[in-house]
Image (tube, rainbow, N blue to C red):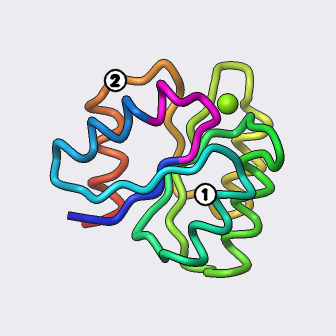
């Protein structure tokens, strides 16, 4: 069981992912943009983060970099869309541990989480 921060500007996706993970016994925190993600990371120190790339206020790549400044060991998995390969590469260089392409299967999300919290 882990404390997981789910970051996406689409509420339905946050709800969907949160349901998947809480049904596995994880504690879920949510944020709707990069600014809130960084604030929530700092105040709650989650075990890992699932983070969308395209968001208002601050995008996922910028938020990843800020979180890595706060905690170089932060475990962040990017939620990406097709056509975002160059951003994904930047995110991996910036320390993202994995990425899940939308639309995603529940199993793919759960295995990305299991790999990082084991
Ligand atoms: Mg988005």
Mark carried by residue 105:
2
Which one is nearer the viewer's eye here, 30 or 102?
30
Quarter of the displayed picture in which ligand 1 can be seen: top right
Residue lying at 64% horizontally and 35% vertically, measured from the top left: 9
Q: Is residue 67 above or below residue 71?
A: above
Q: Secondary structure at mark 1?
A: loop
- The quadrant the C terminus occupies is bottom left
Residue 110 percent location from the top left of the image: 28, 42
Residue that label 1 marks:
96
Residue 67 found in image quarter: bottom right
- The quadrant the N terminus occupies is bottom left
Q: Is residue 70 left or right of residue 48?
A: right
Which one is nearer the viewer's eye here, 18 or 94?
18
Q: Is residue 7 left or right of residue 27?
A: right
Rounded to the nearest whole Å, what is the CA distance between mark 2 and mark 1?
20 Å
Q: Earlier in the sequence, mark 2 or mark 1?
A: 1
Q: Is residue 8 magenta?
A: yes
Mark carried by residue 68:
none
Residue lying at 59% horizontally and 39% vertically, measured from the top left: 8
Q: Is residue 66 magenta?
A: no
Residue 26 found in image quarter: bottom left
Q: Which residues are magenta?
A: 7-14
How packed is label 1: few (under 14 Cα within 10 Å), some, or many (20 or more)? many
How packed is label 2: few (under 14 Cα within 10 Å), some, or many (20 or more)? few
Which one is nearer the viewer's eye here, 102 or 95?
102
Residue 13 percent location from the top left of the image: 48, 28
Q: Is residue 64 above or below residue 33?
A: below
Q: Is residue 85 left or right of residue 96?
A: right
Q: Is residue 106 above or below residue 32?
A: above
């Amino acid at each position: 069981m882990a404390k997981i921060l789910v970051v996406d500007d689409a509420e339905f996706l946050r709800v969907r992912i949160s349901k998947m993970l809480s049904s596995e016994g994880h504690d879920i925190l949510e944020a709707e943009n990069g600014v809130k993600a960084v604030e929530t990371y700092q105040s709650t120190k989650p075990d890992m983060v699932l983070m969308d790339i395209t968001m208002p206020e601050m995008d996922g790549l910028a938020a990843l970099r800020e979180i890595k400044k706060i905690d170089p060991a932060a475990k962040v998995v990017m939620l990406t869309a097709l056509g975002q390969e160059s951003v994904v590469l930047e995110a991996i260089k910036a320390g993202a541990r994995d990425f899940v392409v939308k639309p995603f299967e529940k199993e793919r999300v759960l295995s990305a989480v299991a790999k990082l919290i084991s």
